[in-house]
Image (cartoon, grey):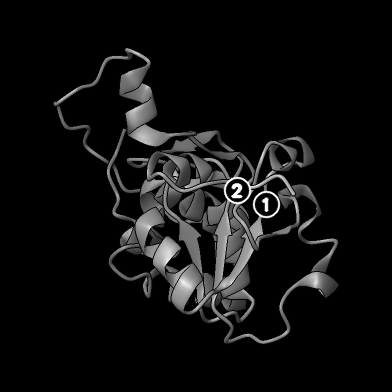
Amino acid sequence: AINIPLGALTQHLDLLPNLDQPMVVYCGSGHRSAIAMTALNLLGYTNVRSMLSGFGGWTNAGNPVSTELTEAVAGTAPEFDVDVFAAVDAYMTSIPEGYWTVRAPDLAVELIENPPILIDVRTDGEWAAGWIEGAVHVSFADMFTLQAEWPQDLTASIVVYDNPTHRSSMTMTILRMLGYENVRVLAGGVGAWTNAGQALVTE
């Protein structure tokens, strides 16, 4: 693996393979890699995947790790649509510390004091097993064919979640690039929510 911090990704595209060559992106949990994968897809990379559950999932499965650095050899970055690159680059270089996530205990407080719009992007089967009270269900597969159901206020506070954070991270990235200003992801998704002692509802 080669290491490129998320916020610097668009500045180091000369280190990546060609647009159609296979790539796997990973981070600690899967959140940042899903953002990176989405950004690369928008730029025109056609064979990028994000490793589910990230480095933690890799080590928990008993897979080996290395401490020897792989030297990244710079080549020539592909040609990109100028406007698309400008939009993706502006987004990637503006990502703050915390990567637009909210932890389960903090979200629980917000839901009492100043509730955001909650969007559950899991499948119908996952939703049926229990959801966070007050959430709206729009599965990731249907998210972009049901655009009329999105909040109309681009400044509204929105929290997207799934389990753990792969689909919600992709959704957040696209919503933010479309102009939504206050979209976050529930860090760790439903698993983190229940592990924090918070309840799910089924009706």
**Amino acid residing under circle 2:** Arg
What amino acid is found at the position of numbered circle 1 in the picture?
Answer: Val
- Residue at 53 percent across and 55 percent down: it is 169
Q: Considering depth in this image, is 176 or 5 the residue closer to the camera? A: 176
User: Which residue occupies 33% across, 20% down?
Assistant: 60
Mark 2 and mark 1: Cα distance apart in space? 7 Å
- Determine whether, in the image, residue 114 is placed left or right of residue 180: left
Judging by the rendered image, the residue that carries numbered circle 1 is 121
In the figure, 76 relative to 27: above or below?
below
Crowd band around label 2 with a 10 angstrom C-alpha radius: few (<14), some (14–19), many (20+): many
| Residue 164: % across, % down | 50, 41
Whole-percent x, y for residue 112 in the image: 48, 71
For label 2, the residue is 167
Tell me if I can see residue 81 in this picture.
no
Front residue of 54 and 104: 104
Q: Position of residue 182 (x, y in %)?
A: 51, 78
Question: Tag 2's secondary structure?
Answer: helix
Q: Earlier in the sequence, mark 2 or mark 1?
A: 1
